[in-house]
Image (cartoon, coloured by chain):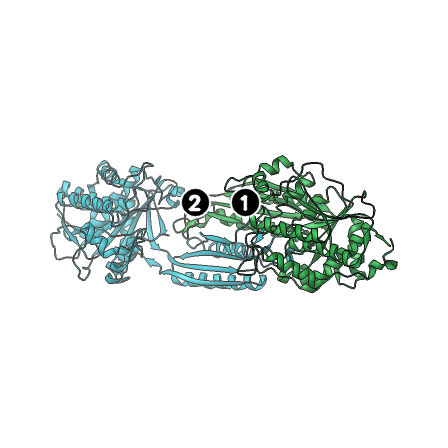
Chain colours: A green, B cyan
Amino acid sequence: MDMQTSPATALRIDGARLWKSLMDLARIGGTPKGGVCRIALTDLDRQGRDLFVQWAREAGCSIRIDAIGNIFARRAGADDSLAPVMTGSHIDTQPTGGKFDGNYGVMAGLEVVRTLNAAGVRTRAPIEVAVWTNEEGSRFVPVMMGSGVFAGAFTLEHALAQRDAQGVSVAEALAAIGYAGQAGAAPAVGAYFEAHIEQGPVLENHERVIGVVQAALGQRWYDVTVQGMEAHAGPTPMELRQDALLAASALVAEVNRIALDRLPHARGTVGSLEVHPNSRNVIPGRVKLSVDLRAPDDAQLLDMDAALRAACARIAAERGLAIGVEQVVYFPPQPFTPHLVEAVRANAADLGYSCMDVVSGAGHDAVYVARVAPAAMVFVPCADGISHNEIEDADPAHLEAGCNVLLRAMLASAGVVA
Amino acid sequence: MDMQTSPATALRIDGARLWKSLMDLARIGGTPKGGVCRIALTDLDRQGRDLFVQWAREAGCSIRIDAIGNIFARRAGADDSLAPVMTGSHIDTQPTGGKFDGNYGVMAGLEVVRTLNAAGVRTRAPIEVAVWTNEEGSRFVPVMMGSGVFAGAFTLEHALAQRDAQGVSVAEALAAIGYAGQAGAAPAVGAYFEAHIEQGPVLENHERVIGVVQAALGQRWYDVTVQGMEAHAGPTPMELRQDALLAASALVAEVNRIALDRLPHARGTVGSLEVHPNSRNVIPGRVKLSVDLRAPDDAQLLDMDAALRAACARIAAERGLAIGVEQVVYFPPQPFTPHLVEAVRANAADLGYSCMDVVSGAGHDAVYVARVAPAAMVFVPCADGISHNEIEDADPAHLEAGCNVLLRAMLASAGVVA
């Protein structure tokens, strides 16, 4: 399919319609501060799902629900036996979430369908819009639950058995909202695209409209415990101290240096740190801290792991105290599929949007889907890089641009019947 | 008075009797773990006070209570118009306190009186044993309340008006336990000695029995707030971060360096540090921490203050975030009285005890009394330097040695009538 000669080249999505869909959906669980609280598998989630299903049916789609509650809205293709070209994201939110995280990817998929309908465009392969269950993990872990089951990252049984803080299982919650669908092997996907706000500051900082996502960073998370000796700050001279916070502070600096030594994509963060006994005039006896290391490939991530362990050993030896390191999470790096990434880049350029190559530092449903299907992502800026916050915001023009790129990339994959 | 020719030279306190007094007193508020919980101005404090008063009366002392509840047990001198030679400490404890902190100084004073009684020694000046109200400050602040009022560090009215967490005032609590005594100007004190466990590791580390306390360190305490920018750890590249914890960690290292540059006596501690939002995968947006600087003289303490403020300004500028510094406490350095310090040293040497010069890093009632009277302290080791803990422990032989030094130093000041 040569896009330059296709009538599809002139197609543009309706930015105002996309924006209205986002705002209408955001009323379900809308908060006084302008955010959204629509926790996975609650009645508000059901209301959001029902609205999507209603809109998708009105757009002529058929609906399929799988056993973990993922919704697939399908627009038939000229050859409906072909594997669908899929897009999607999630509509569950953090407790103090925004209107765009996840919701944008789903509404952009719906807008692609509506645009094709309005223009009477028939695609060769079918088009599907997916709503993945429980991406956020606020109520049930693991996060990215629906896409994780779809991709075989963990089993359906494992996911269904998870319970929230009140003891309600995923299976029970799915049944309660009427979204426990049919079990069965996940169908093949021809290509998967996910449009998403960046949730970071890179695009805004570089004044670009489209982020061409190369890969999702691999992640290793650790719990670190520094065990020193609690003592009175006044009577204990400097040379007789085993100050756990002083050692922990050296480690915070090292985690930062480990990432700085591996720019541009490596990241190192200590987000959580707790001091015991945390009293003004007591030398800290114990500090617990988290370490979060991210890198675009496994070799670099393993190198960072080794550097972290070496830093802990060196600090412990120098300061005469004990430092324990336990890895608690590993997500492998996930490159996206080169020819789909290139389709995103080429179509963004064709449309005249400024763009740049980026990596995804956060997890997304596309990261799991990429394990079982060709996949790529389209990022658009969000205001001040802020997400997971009620003040999360995005420029309607940027959302429109990202959706136009999505439309063109999907058409390139699905093919257009003249 | 030449001690070498006096019959007092041969006097020794009764170590077993001293130990028994400590153990008997420790039963009032004794905890299952072997500590003591006898909070100021509670009924347990009353029971402890009553026992002291009973013992002091049995030892022939007269009792005087002042308006803040300080107890003075007086053994008359040959010239009772002379200003008394005083010793003492406190019997209130921390909630998880030990048997020795404070209690040792009071029981050592009682043991001095009993020893003089048993030997029939008459002193020229009267001897007094003081029990200072609310040294610990666990229930009512300010700490060192009784000695603070005595020394004019703050007014009686201010102290009486303070309230605990339940809204009970010091005045009400004193009346309730029957220890609201007579108001009036504090009488002159000829000399004040206080025996105390070191509450630190220096004597044990140097294997010395007696610490000759030169001065109490001055203290400046600060609240520091580092204001950065909260952001997602994954999507935010290293160069676009304003990580409040990374800046705070640099400050923790600087506080340590500020003290290390001013050894042997300077101290710098960050005891409390709180991270917001303290989530594993969120770059910390705000950190609040305490800084505790101590030094033996005001010039050095001011120099440390300037170094702290310079470090905060430099770190804030380098990292592009804001650091606020607020001083919340100032205790001036307090040198002890040279001829009394020398009396402690000389008598310890005469008695054949190993000794060394030390500073007091913590506050003690003697630090306030030193503002209005000649004063000195005698330190003895405590096990592993641990205090304010139910496992606080001390060697009976060390307690006996400290009490013998106290006896001799007091006799040297009071004079013995042959």
Which residue sits at x=14%, y=52%? B124
What mark, if any, has residue B93 been given in the picture? none
Of B417 and A280, the residue lying toward us:
A280
Residue B140, position as x, y percentages in the image: 30, 54
Q: Is residue B55 above or below residue A48?
A: above
Q: Viewer-nearest of labels 2 and 1?
A: 2
Q: Residue at x 17, y 46 (%)?
A: B53
> Element under label 2?
loop
Q: Nearer the viewer, residue B208 or A382?
A: A382
Q: Quadrant of residue B304?
A: bottom left
Name the side, left or right, on which A18 lies relative to B51.
right
What residue type is disc 1 on?
Glu
Q: Is residue B68 left or right of residue B220?
A: left
User: Chain for mark 1?
Assistant: A
In the picture of the structure, the residue carrying the numbered disc 1 is A318
Depth check, front residue: A170 or A191: A170
Residue B391: which quarter of the image? top left
- Residue drawn 81% across the image and 42% down it: A81
SS under mark 1: helix
Q: Are marks 2 and 1 on the same chain?
A: yes
Q: Which residue is mark 2?
A: A230
Q: CA distance from mark 2 to mark 1?
A: 18 Å
Assess disc 1: are there few (<14), some (14-19) or many (≥20) residues with their C-alpha within 10 Å of its C-alpha. Answer: few
